[in-house]
Amino acid sequence: MSRITALLLCLSMLCLLPGPAHSASYIEVTAPGNRQLKLAVVPAQPAAGAAAHPELANEMAETEAFDLNMSGLFAAERHDAAPLPQGLGLSVIDYVPWLSAGYDYVIRGEYALRSDGLTAEFRLFDVLGKKQLLVKRYIGQAKDLRYFAHAFCDEVLGTLTGEKGAFTSRLIYVSSQTGHKEIYIMDWDGHNTQQITRNRSITISPDISPDGREIIFTSYKRGNPDLYKRALSSTVDVPISTRRGLNITGAWSPDGTKIALALSKDGNTELYTINRDGSAPTRLTVSHSANVSPAWSPDGSKIAFVSDRMGRPQIFVMDANGGNVHRLTTNGGSNFNPAWSPKGDKIAYTHQSGSFQIYLMNADGSGNTQLTTVGRNERPRWSPDGRLLAFSSERSGSDSIYVMRLDGSGQTKVSHTTGQNIHPVWTPRR
Amino acid sequence: MRKESKGLMIALGLVAMMAAGCAKEEVVKQDEPVVPQQTVKQAEPAQPAQPAAQQQEQKQEATASDEAAANALETVYFDFDKSDLRQDARDALSKNAEVLLKKLADAKIQIAGNCDERGSDEYNLALGDRRAKSAAKYLETLGVKADRISTISYGKEKPAVQGHDESAWAKNRRDDFVIVK
């Protein structure tokens, strides 16, 4: 324990060295190599004739700074500046003060809150290149202000890297806040939390359809651990696999046509695929052991899973039809919760030898890298852009949902619900 | 499957013969006149048999205090990450079988497999399933009919005791026996 503390101290001292690049309010560890780009987010100014609502402007600016910091590309911070006298309009900004303050990019904006809703416009400026890179205008209601900020940050990353951000994604997860494990949804940064299920039972292991419209989960609401499906727009749980025994760890195939899951109807817990309505079960694994937690490769051709066929639970991979099984993890201990990266090149998982920690490996099992060190950490899941991992950690007492970058930096608690908070899953971008 | 049930029948036959043998000895000692009749009757059921009147009496007792009867079914404990039955588990299960064959001859039970907090919750669901099933199988070999037994796994969702040490874990790695009918 003291060794971990010492390591953390070293890391946080390293963080302090680069100085101004690390002014964010949460602890983070810089990736070696690239210098982070310095970005100023100026709170948006009221449009001509619109009333000032600094609390809205500040919340949007803080949201943008938080998102862009977590991307790992930027040291982003809110930076107050005098309003542009002629508004955003067609005016060019004065780049000189930003240049001398060491900034690479500046975001400025304009907003108008009227009786019929909220309008916001954001612009990204390249300080060194002295040019405007991106303009986006958002029209909606006041409650959408965080969504506006997230949506703009998705575009900023798209403009600068060619790969959009995923800050408009939300996280589905399980919380025991009410005393029962139920499914919840929140923005990726923990805001706008809503309870989805009210089963007053044990409801766990959610997954979301690739189109973002439906979730599946396992619930004991009718006694047996059955698999249910539910449209996010609905309050009705539709049972889709109620076979005798376990109906657990459902995982939607990338093309949305099938669900892989673990069933114990034939004795052992084995992996099967079923159609999205629960029909046509096809058995994939044949063993005398437990097989759970299927994870599809993004092209749908392979499935990683957990099996204890060789002793302690380990991660294996097979073709999506069940053929060509081989073991991926050989680093001792037990290994759980495989999650395939959106690009297909990496698998994140949980390694247990004493404590539980999140690891990353190449999809062929090589190159194991430990990402977490503090507390018990489980069940990593990739953001749709592959830049972030969500996971659960009980480092601060009871389990909470955390988010971090792929190098283990920026580990940040995002869930606000009490009790146990586990099983995060990212929705597609909104 | 066929083979297994044939083996089971042979085993049950042996049990029945042994039961009959015991009864005969007892009867000889008591020197009652109805010996031959009783012996024939007792050889028929594939379970350790009892006089019908006595069975009836016990059944009434059971319905009178269902809770006491449920408590008569002992919890079975397991080693870490294991689902095979220890000696103490087999002892407990044979006592449970005795209760299910005599006192609670009509009862249906659900065996709930549970795990300690270590291991992933998803994997533990499968481990709990295996624990429930290994107890179910053993009860079946002891003569409890399979259609009286159902299983469920709660993984680590329903710990018997809170705590993060071996003494808590040992109490949580278990099969609970619940009377469902």
Image (spheres, coloured by chain):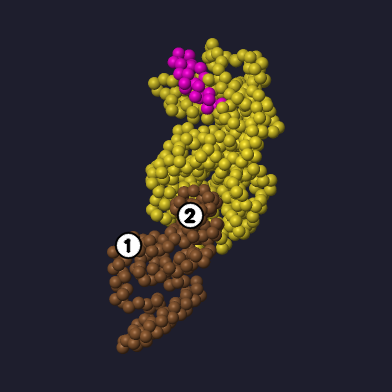
Chain colours: A yellow, B brown
Disc with the residue nearer the chain's start (2 vs 1): 1
In x, y percent, where is residue B92? 45, 65
Number of labelled discs? 2
Q: Residue at x 58, y 35 (%)?
A: A411
Region of the chain picked out in magenta, as a range: A44-65
In x, y percent, where is residue A84? 55, 13
In x, y percent, where is residue A419? 45, 41
Q: Amino acid at mark 2?
A: Asn
Q: Quadrant of residue B66?
A: bottom left
Q: Residue at x 44, y 20 (%)?
A: A113
Q: Dot 1: what SS?
A: helix
In x, y percent, where is residue A406? 62, 38
Q: Residue at x 48, y 55 (%)?
A: B171
> Numbered disc 1: what chain?
B
Residue B172: which numbered mark, if any? Answer: 2
Residue B66: which numbered mark, if any? Answer: 1
A327 or A394: nearer the viewer: A394
